[in-house]
Image (cartoon, grey):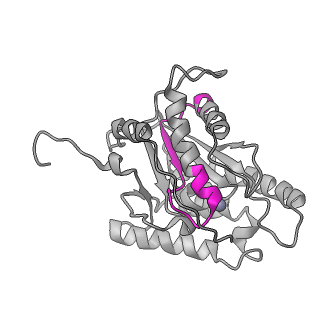
Amino acid sequence: MPAMRRPHARRRACVAVVVALLVLPTAAARAADRTVLAIGAHAGDAEVTTGAILARHKRLGDRVVMLHLTLGEGGNPKMSPAAYGEQKKREALAAAQALGAEVLFGPWKDGELRDSEEAARWVADAIRQVKPTHVITHWKASLHPDHEAAHRIVDAAVLLASLEGFESAHPRHRGVRGVYYADNWEDAEGFSPYLYVDVTEDLAAWKSAVTSYEFIRGGISSFPYLEYYEALARVRGAVAGKRFAVALEVDLFGKRRVLESLP
Ligand SMILES: [Zn+2]
């Protein structure tokens, strides 16, 4: 895995304001009125980190969608990017089917994702088409530049998608209730679990989906993906009082609570 570092771009103040206005989901949120959109830099990122949450929401009757910005086709030293990209796409389709998720693919190449206006506009148009109520993507700090770029692109795209002034083939979408950041081993710097989702009944579906990918079954990367994320779900579950849970982080402004009195 690349371990390049680059300074984090300062978040746009206007994006922070919009996030402050988003409403965190509550137990009162009705099932079946949600569309959860998970956006990952590479095919496999969304499934391995938050696939169990997607499986849970599918089971609750919600619509779940994944957007893979790149195929992550550069991750297999034994195969050409073209051949591995074909494999990753087949694996992504199988994983989506196992989760009951729709799947979309971005046009970018592995390692070439950039925080650009063009990328934000493309993702904003995808958001307008999918009309998510909840968006999950990468945390802001990562070992992988593609992950950091995805974080910034998605934050900008959620805002753009809501603006009347941004013209695209689809009408604006202002229905995003929350943007959440995934618990990813590559995106760990400064990640502090904020929200825990009980996935005890969904871990089997998650495992079935993620093992569609050869890199998760083992043999490509030395990183033990399956063991790590299953153990992580147990660790997050332990502190949440559940058997298995998946943790999410939110923007600092998303943690602001304004009450009439102490809860
Ligand atoms: Zn990745």
Q: Residue at horizontal 77%, vertical 74%?
A: 220
Q: How many marks?
A: 0
* Residue 142 horizontal side relative to residue 19, left or right: right
Horizontally, residue 208 falls left or right of residue 29, namely right
Image: magenta residue range? 128-150
The image shows residue 168 at horizontal and vertical percentages of: 64, 22
Residue 173 percent across, percent down from the top left: 52, 26
- The residue furthest left is 261
What's the residue at 50%, 24% (across, down)? 163
Tell me where residue 249 sits by quadrant. Answer: bottom left
* 55 relative to 75, above or below: above
Q: Is residue 30 above or below residue 241?
A: above
Residue occupying image coordinates x 65% and y 53%: 41
Residue 97 seen: no
Q: In the shown orientation, is residue 133 left or right of residue 254? A: right
Q: Is residue 254 above or below residue 177?
A: below
Given residues 110 and 92, the one toward you in this image is: 110
Is residue 235 a member of the stretch shown in magenta? no
Query: Is the N terminus in the top left, top right, bottom left or bottom right quadrant?
Result: bottom right
**Is 136 contained in the magenta span?**
yes
Towards the viewer: 28 or 251: 251
Q: Residue at x 84, y 61 (%)?
A: 84
